[in-house]
Amino acid sequence: MKNPLMPVAASAAAGALALSLPPARALIEQSMVWHMLVQMPLLVATGWLGAAAFTAPGGQGWPGTERLNRFGLTGFMLALGAMAYWMIPATVDRAVVLPTADLAKVVSLVIAGVALRQSFGVAPAAVQLFFAGSALPMMGWLGVYMAGTDRRLCNAYSLESQIAAGQGLVVLAMFLGVCWGLALWQRGSGSIPNARF
Amino acid sequence: MPPVKPGHDPRTDGLMLTFGACLAVLLAALVLMYRATDGGSAFTTETLRRSEVARAPVQVPDFRVIDAGGNAQSLRALLAQSGDRAWIVDFVYTRCQTLCLALGTTFQRLQATIVEQGLQDRVGLLSISFDPLQDGPPALTDYAKRMRMQPGVWRLVSLQHETDRRRLLDNFGIMVVPAPLGEFEHNAALHLIDPAARLVHIFDLGEPGAALEAALVVRNAHVSLSTR
């Protein structure tokens, strides 16, 4: 049976990868918005959708990973680490300049997406709250700082581009927060036993 | 099948394994971040570049440069021209309306201080244009006039060969980004070059005093070493 998510995941992957290759690479080289707000989220989405497409409907995680990812802890830790790493201005610069760093970015953010999908399926609300409560404010504060400072944080991008990306990060953090709240609410009213944790 | 204890929750099976995996992931992430930020001290490329140079001086590469008079010479020859001088170097393009104006003002103040204190034999100022296509001798002449450069103190050059541009910027760690209205944005700083033509320190635009002081220190250290 073909999963209907497959084509969506494939298009996210195609879009995200195209941005790392010429000619579309010029977009992420010139604009921090394209890099941090389009490509990076697309890479995470690729991992998320890909993992979802390969998980049986109603399934909560992959057999074999359960013992390593109780309550989704390991997956969240992995995703948090990858996201924090690629939010450091110096690493963003490196991904623009060095193809090897860019490859590492692509791989690690896709893995982060996979890990997030696996963890959200099995994590109790309290663990989710802890994770989202650290990742989203981190994103929001970085955005506020990037938009507010007159210091150029990335040598690869103009200040103008940095301010736009900063504002975008704040919006993205709020948007993800709302999405997460809605998903949790929906799950809470559903029949998944973990939700009472 | 082993007997299941009352109150046993299968969801906690292998919890220690999960804790171990978490710890491993956390450690790996911390090590990677520690390495990427020079031990948590530098979160931007600019601070990384500065601490790298401060730790290990970089030999200045040699290029053919051209001045406002159209005279071509090698960069090393220019640096060595007037004896044992330390140089404070900045990178500009003469059409600049933004950051380089601030750089220009800083260099004007430095020039005034150097002349006042009679330091011109010990410290020189050098502006290098990274826009060789636009900055030929006429543009350089114009800029030198606008900045009231005194040739004995403050030199201005452009690259003779456009092909050297990439190498120059890479060697000094300068990234030039196209900005609106045909401008460029670039990391502006004061680069201290010792009399042995090594880039030894990079100062913030706002620290000309510290740069001048350090220039005198490296110059005096060089002279006392070579006369020993």
Image: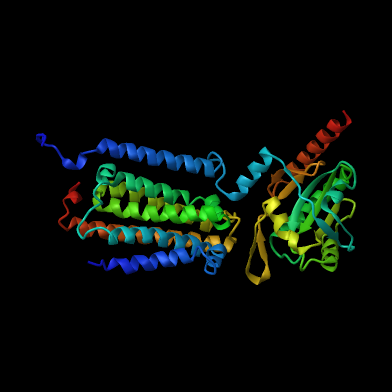
Residue B9 shown left or right of residue B181 in the figure: left
Q: In the figure, residue A151 lies in which quadrant?
A: bottom right
Query: Residue B68, how many percent across, how many down?
Result: 87, 62
In depth, the one of A197 and A63 nearer the eye is A63
Query: Residue A32, how many percent across, how many down?
Result: 52, 61
Question: Which residue: 55% across, 50% down?
Answer: A90
In depth, the one of B59 and A40 nearer the eye is B59
Residue B221 shown left or right of residue A179 in the figure: right
Question: Which residue: 61% across, 46% down?
Answer: B47
Query: Residue B173, how many percent across, how many down?
Result: 67, 51
Query: Residue A55, how many percent across, how many down?
Result: 25, 58
The residue at the far top in this view is: B228
The residue at the far bottom in this view is: B181
Q: In the figure, residue B141 lies in which quadrant?
A: bottom right
In depth, the one of A97 and A150 nearer the eye is A97
Residue A97 shown left or right of residue B206 in the figure: left
In depth, the one of A148 and A127 nearer the eye is A127
